[in-house]
Image (spheres, helix red, strand yellow):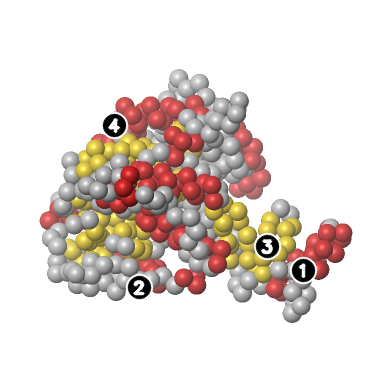
Amino acid sequence: MDPHWFARIGRTQIFSAAILLFSVSLLGKAQSTPSSSVDPQIRDASQFDPNRPLAHELGMGVAEGFTFVAVGDCILSRPVSQYAQRQPDFAGILEILQRADATFGNLETTIVDLRAFHGYPYSGPDDVTLAAEPRVAEDLAKMGFRLLSRANNHALDWGIEGMHETSRWLDEAAIVHAGSGENRGLARAAQYFESGKGRVAIVSMASSFRPTTDALPPQGAAPGRPGISALKLKKTTVVPATVMGHLQAIADELYPEKSKDAIKQASPASNAPQKLTIFGNKFEVGPVYAYRYDMDPADLAEVLKSIRQGKQHSDFLVVSIHSHEPAKSLSSDPINDFADNPAPFLHVLARSAIDAGADEFVVTGIHHLGPIEIYKDRPIFYGLGDFFWSDIQEPLPADLYEQSQELLAKAFEYPQKATDADLNNLLNAEAFAGELPFQSVISESHFDHGVLNELRLYPVELGYGMKLTESGIPRIASAKQGREILIHLREMSQSYGTEIQVESVSPSHYVGFVRRQRGSAHK
């Protein structure tokens, strides 16, 4: 393959994309738009300079032809740019990353020099502690990355010391990063990249994170706490009335006194309560199985305020959230989980972020592709999947082996002989089976006159089943696989009113396009 063919893709004839409003009924009453707007609302206009209106600062200010590239989770442990010398499809990807005015990804690892590291590992429950060697930061910059989100569930795998060291290596590589800091204010704050076509800001947050890894503000005599920018959620599982009846029967056996109060609130039709808490989980009656997540109002207000200020101080703003929360998957089968839709709160959050000033909204963390929505001429990506997926992870700490004793004993005759690679293989087989975690897209957004003019989607595959030294490195997908990836993405996105045109741009490759019709605006 010619690694330069992407640079020669010209803009074809622009045609209409039927963009429809996403059905408000899908969001549910509890997922409605927050009542308090981020706009402080001017009380006395005479207090302001009429030649410097506040609304003007929320517009897009980048130069014409601004191009922004966004990819998903970057889970890598070593430099990989050298593979472009022998993998033309990877070289083609690097060309896309490097030609953009700004390139974004989610850094889901800790960059540390373990030979001189003075911190300690902190594994999550049944979760691998990720680490990358120091040269990774410089390699990411070499590949074209200028902006990285840091708020995710792996940001403090190696404690606060690891968070600090990651920041140091990224700073030395001149990569702008956001989402972590010495206190909540710094973790929430936008960070800025000075591109040739305008100042680009990034705000990063996570709704999926381990306890005590969220940053705290000072409170009285208590100091603030370093960590990530967190958006806390309250989760409720919605179940049919018949299931609620079964849960109530269990509660009657466990908590007979509490059950008397629950019966008073029971639905006459089913004799089951409308709400119930059992085993620490909240349940609520509804027509179908689903999860509902209620965003913490204080966290949401702080995040939206950071977005507003970030946009006021920049020409273009990308907002990222790391979220594992599905809409309704209750299956224990990880392959089925990969087909799930984004939780409704993400729709509300994404639109609220754009209303507050965001020019692009990206969801990471679900390890598979999600749908695309265009709202007010701004793209929303509900899942960009994995961009790097390094299964070479060492060293793994002792507590991860202790958590996995039963799994190791089931898989090996002599589990004590299992290596880090052996254990990692078992954990991935449990949670990340099949090809979907190894399929993704590169999104390349083209903006003119302050609106999205064209979105290009390059299908990517990460070498599923290849040897570990080559698996997890992105490559432009072949014609057959690329077309399948794009058609799958098109089908997911149609209910959001997004029309993706799947076009052959060479005998061996496809690209997806979302084009804006002249003289109209996406809703």
State how far apart marks 2 and 3 are (Cα).
Answer: 33 Å
Q: Earlier in the sequence, mark 2 or mark 4?
A: 2
Amino acid carrying label 3: it is Phe
* Image depth: mark 2 or mark 1 in front: 1
Viewer-proximal residue among 312 and 164: 312
Per the model, the C-alpha gap separating discs 2 and 1 is: 40 Å
Q: Along the horizontal axis of the image, is 319 left or right of 407?
A: left
Q: Which residue is mark 2?
A: 20
Label 3 and label 1: CA atoms lie apart by 14 Å
Q: Quadrant of residue 21?
A: bottom left
From the image, tell me which residue sits under label 4: 174
Residue 111 % position (x, y): 41, 32
The kind of secondary structure element at disc 4 is loop
Tell me how far mark 2 sits from mark 4, CA to CA. Answer: 40 Å
At a point 38% along the width and 27% down the height, the residue shown is: 168
- Secondary structure, mark 1, is loop
**Mark 4 or mark 3, which is nearer the start of the sequence?**
4
- Amino acid, disc 1: Gln
Q: Confirm whether residue 28 shows in the render.
A: yes
* Location of residue 166 in the rendering, given as x and y in whole percent from the top left corner: 41, 30
Say few, some or many: other residues with alpha carbon within 10 Å of mark 4 (under 14 / 14 to 19 / 20 or more). Answer: some
- The label shown at residue 283 is 3
Which tag is nearer the camera, tag 2 or tag 3?
Answer: 2
**Residue 86 picture location, percent across and down:** 23, 43
What x and y, as percent, mark residue 158? 51, 31
Q: What amino acid is labelled 4 in the image?
A: Ala
Secondary structure, mark 2, is: loop
Disc nearest the viewer among 2 and 4: 2
Q: Are marks 2 and 3 in contact (CB under 8 Å)?
A: no
Q: Which mark is residue 265?
A: 1
